[in-house]
Amino acid sequence: MTTLFSDDVTIILTAGLVATACAILGVFLVLRRVALMGDAVSHAVLPGIVAVFLLTESRAPFPMIVGAALFAILCVLAIEWLRGTGLLRADAAIGLVFPALFALGVLGIHRYAGNIHLDLDSTIYGEIAFAPFRTVEIGGVLVAQSLIISGAVAIVNLALVVLLWKELKATTFDPEFSKSVGLNPTWVSRMLLVAVSITAVTAFESVGAILVVALLIVPAAAAYLLTDRLWAMVAIAVGIGWISAVVGYTGAVQADASIAGAMGVTAAVLFGVALIASPKYGLLARRIALHRRRRATRPVAAQEG
Amino acid sequence: MGVIAEQLSATFPLTYSEAIVAMGAAILGIAAGMLGALAVLQGRSLVGDALAHSALPGVAVAFIVTGAKDPASLLAGAILAGIVGAFMIVGIERTSRIRPDAAIGVVLSSFFALGIVLLTYISNTGGAQQAGLDTYLFGQAAGIVERDVEIMAVMAGGAALVVVAFFRIFKTVLFDRSFASSLGVPVKIVELATTALLVVAIVIGLRTVGAILMVAMLITPTVVARQFTNRLVWLLPVAALVGATVGITGALASSQAEVPTGPVIVLVGVSLAVLAILFAPGRGVAWRAATLARARRRENTSGVLVALETAMHHGAPPTPRELALASGRSARSVRRGLRDLSRAGLVQRDEGRVILNERGAAAAHAALESRRLWSAWLEHGWRLDLPDAREADPRDLRASLGDDAVDQLVVLEREATA
């Protein structure tokens, strides 16, 4: 039986698809100013993963997704409840809830580390390097399981965003208007965060619990510096995700370091480039524009004076 | 340090190494509580999260440069990286269109990714030398030795001195930035100092709690302390005390159970915070709910009393059913009100009918009087001629406004009705 892709290609494709799934959602997190809720939710799925693992003793994707989504909803509701008490600020509410849930997950892993194939290192680094080893047979060829899962999530996220494009756009850019036409921004936000949690749990195996955040926020933030159009922002974020996957994998193999970490670093470097050199919003462009404006206004001011 | 630890292990049922762990955790708790408060009160607690994550590559770089696991140089690396991270957050926020939440997220995940790359690089290339660097992720209190505690104590002491010495300046900037700058306080320098202190607190906690969960240690003491006091002078020491308690409990529990310390400390701290949010006297959610329920019950009882008095006025003593119909209240609320009234000895039952006794009638009149006074206050209160500002309490207007005011109100009302 032949395998469909070589190991290298499998890893890069998996990484690219995970990055795609993350970037599509990340764009909306960044635009809605809830980037840190995305961070919180992707931490909060860990106890869900661990609990399902302990209950079913398998890594079947569907129960994991359910467990993770439950904890993500719990996390969002807990944060909203704490905010609603008015006894602490919104940022403190986030900072209380997700470390607590993450801590539960870490303790669960540590407690049962001997019995299950789940350990702290893979929680943090992910095990994308093992992606080619778990394969399933489709139509006579072997395909990596994680490739199928991350591809499915990327497609689901894409479909979600395409189908709800209008709703997402309205609630993101004009919550007041969307309320007046009967769209509830809170529910759209919650749905988005549940999608983030599902993405996080499937990305968990490949890039680890924490680096998911890097793929969610960094490409989207970089894309935000490069364009004013929503569809372009999604496309650029996905592109940055793919570049991170390819460059990160190559770099990691050469330096003998974590692939997921290297992807995060690549995305960060690309963000840095966008921050400095973006044609419209970059530091350089702004400097130059400021300089030109000063030069242009100086003679006018002199004449008036 | 060793002397204190020996003393501790002599006084309490602790081994020498447990005493060291407890001291380290206490210092961490005090520093995190006090210095975390400065960030939490500014609404920038998640900056702490980002800085904690960005300390990680600092530790890794320091290890690569020095090639040894000397705590002082590793922590120096962490401090440096934390400060670079802080500058990057502020820089991204100020110079670009990226909003604060995304700026925090970008710095947090970028530095953490870098830290992971460096840590895996070290562990794949180095030998046994590097073992234990990953305790900086989730903390391992059991690994703390005397030298660690000494370094932590020096840093925490220095930071505490700074806070005490410049307390008034911190306070002014914390509560009113523009007022502070109008007084000539160098606000930007103070904010920089706050961030630097935050980094110090994080670095102190790095060995014990770890980079990933440190943020909770910065937040929980302040959240707990905030439920018990409104004053910064009290908030800082209470937060320090809460931090120390959480730190010691978590560190000792985790080193006995041989699990990473960070998660245990975080769970202890967050449970304490949730308890405080629920049950803090005067502010807690459960406390407020109980006060509200008592007030509603009192209102209901007094309403039933007045309705009963009106019904008695119009004819025969009513049955509870008739009372409910006449007053427009639900049968349940009438039943409850009557139960309270008969417990207070204001009503009697006679063959299913309710009779207001003499004391009950007096109480009903008092309740009616107090209602009339309250509407008089709402209508004419603005015309009162009072020497000072007073706050009216609808439950007892006479006690809260004073006899002179109430007498004036009565006169005003009589004039209006005449």
Image (cartoon, coloured by chain):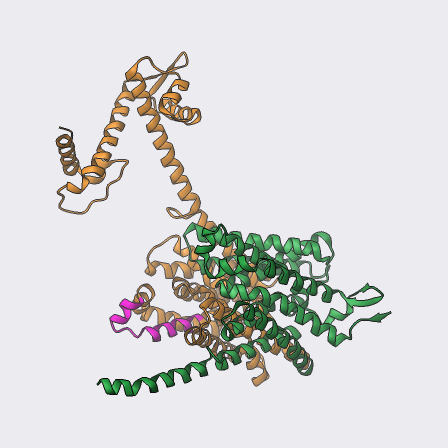
Q: Is residue B306 visible?
A: yes
Q: Viewer-proximal residue, B6 or B373?
A: B373
Quadrant in which the N terminus of chain A appears: bottom right
Quadrant in which the C terminus of chain A appears: bottom left
Location of residue A101 by image quarter: bottom right
Q: Colour of chain B?
A: orange
Q: Tell me residue A124's x, y (percent).
A: 63, 68
Q: Tell me residue B126's x, y (percent).
A: 66, 81
Query: Would you say the magenta stretch is mainly helix, strand or loop?
Result: helix
Q: Tell me residue B341's x, y (percent).
A: 36, 24
Give the magenta-colored segment's residue range.
B177-198
Q: Which chain is green?
A: A
Residue located 43% across and 74% down the image: B90
Q: Is residue A124 visible?
A: no
Location of residue B243 by image quarter: bottom left
Q: Tell me residue B353's x, y (percent).
A: 38, 14
Residue A10 higher or lower than B10, as above or below: below
